[in-house]
Each structure stands twice: as structure tokens, then as C-alpha cells.
Image (tube, grey):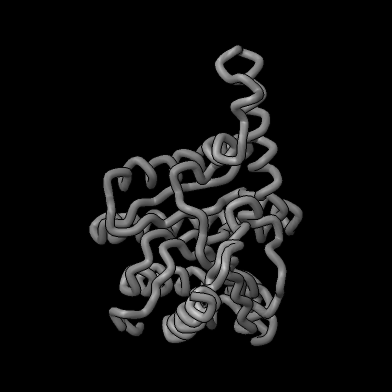
Amino acid sequence: MSTVQHRIVPQHVAIIMDGNGRWANARGLPRTFGHRKGVETVRETVKAAGEAGISFLTLFAFSSENWRRPEAEVNELFGLLKAFIRRDLADLHRAGVRIRVIGDRLNLRDDIRSLLLEAEETTVKNTAMTLVIAFNYGSRDEIARAAARLAVEVQAGRLDPSQIDAQKLNDFLDTAGIPDPDLVIRTSGEERLSNFLLWQAAYAELMFVPDFWPDFTPALFDSVLERYAARDRRFGGLSAKAVAVGS
């Protein structure tokens, strides 16, 4: 990956890892082969993000809608998560990577829930990079759970309704303490957010690449970061060029 020092690097990159099944189907392979190849791509991407100087990397690993898939495929995805954490946790910890997990954990199996907690607790003091795993995650569900928690605070008299604003709601989201993504990438050619970080991505740059997730190489990641660096981010204000012309 390019390490050009003057290039603008996003602090937080979020990725919708899409296309594992179609990658496998295109090769006449079972969908499970695509998911396994996708895990290899995760390893490469985490390493590449660290080398690029990215501070936060969020990966959409399992959505709250993925429960609709065949039970065998869901079990395969769960198994791959367990294998990834068991195999890679020590390496991530040595590299100074902190793991955060977002999503609803109430309906997860006990073994999965305890494994996610172990990964978080083991790496809680690491500061090199934060890897955010969105597992059993859906943005609308996240916002609804945050609103319910706010309602509990109001009902208990610990919070006045007049104190609720965008920042207060933000503090009750799964991503509290994590900066909003600067860049959201989706692979496979689909051009939608699919209930991913809808609140947090309000001002994110969106990049849609045609390649399936297993083909998302470090070189392709680097090219997306180059495109990001060329974007003119205004956040509702004037661009730097417009200011220069008007001054």
C-alpha cells in the first residue's frame, strides 16, 4: 500500500463487505468458499488500513437482516467469526489493534457473545488502531435501541426531554466514542448503504467499487484512498477552492 506522507488519509473507514456468495458462484463454488476467502481479505485489509495510518476501521460482518439466510450459511458465518477471533486475536493484540463490537448481542448464542466480549476486553488498552466489527447490526435497530435507552433515562428523571439533541442521541448509540466515518466503501457494485451506519454516515464520502469483496486487494484499497484524497469535503460549507476565489 502507498505510504505517501502528504496524502489526506481518512481517520475512519467503514466497509460493507459485499459479494462473497457471488464471487463463489461465478467460480462454480459453494457460497461458503466465498465467505472463507472473504476472511482472508479481512486480514489483508486490516493490515493495509494500519499501514495507511487509518485510526478506525469498521467492517460490516453480519447484519440483523442476515438471519433470513439459510441456517447452514448463518452457522458458517458464525463459525468463521469464531475462527477469525481465535486465530487472529493474538496477532491483532500484538499489533496494538483494539476491537470494538457494535450491534445487538441479546439474541446471539452464548459462545459468540462471550468470544466477542473476550476480544474487546483483551484489546481494550490498545491504541494503534480500532477495528470495529458490526455484528448482528442494523442501523435502524441501533437508533431505536438508543431512543429506548433515552426514554428510560427520561422516565427515571435522570434526563429532561429538553436536553435531548443530536449529540445526546449520538452518545447512546453503539458507536459512542467512535468518530463518524469519513469514508464508506461498498464492494460488489451495489450502490446502497443497506441499513449500515445511517446516522453516522451523514457526511461520509461514499465509494462503490464493482469488485466482489474477496477481490478487494490492498492495491484496490489504496486506489480508493487515492480517490478519497481527491474529494473536496465541505460539510455543508464552501469548498476551499470557492473560498480562495472569493477572498
Q: Locate residue 141: give its quadrant.
A: top right
Residue 190 in view in this figure: yes
Give coordinates of residue 27: x percent, y percent: 64, 87
Q: Residue at x 48, y 47 (%)?
A: 101
Give coordinates of residue 19: x percent, y percent: 64, 74
Q: Quadrant of the N terminus?
A: bottom left
Q: Residue at x 38, y 47 (%)?
A: 119
| Residue closer to the observer: 104 or 6 | 6
Q: Residue at x 34, y 84 (%)?
A: 2
Left or right? Give the position of 202 relative to 140.
left
| Residue closer to the observer: 35 or 13 | 13
Q: Residue at x 45, y 62 (%)?
A: 12
Q: Locate residue 17: give its quadrant.
A: bottom right
In the rendered image of this protein, does residue 159 appear above or below residue 47? Answer: above
Left or right? Give the position of 85 relative to 245.
left
| Residue closer to the observer: 48 or 122 | 48
| Residue closer to the observer: 80 or 197 | 197
In the rendered image of this protein, does residue 196 appear above or below residue 50? Answer: above
Which residue is at the far front?
247
Residue 217 in view in this figure: no
Give coordinates of residue 195: x percent, y percent: 69, 56
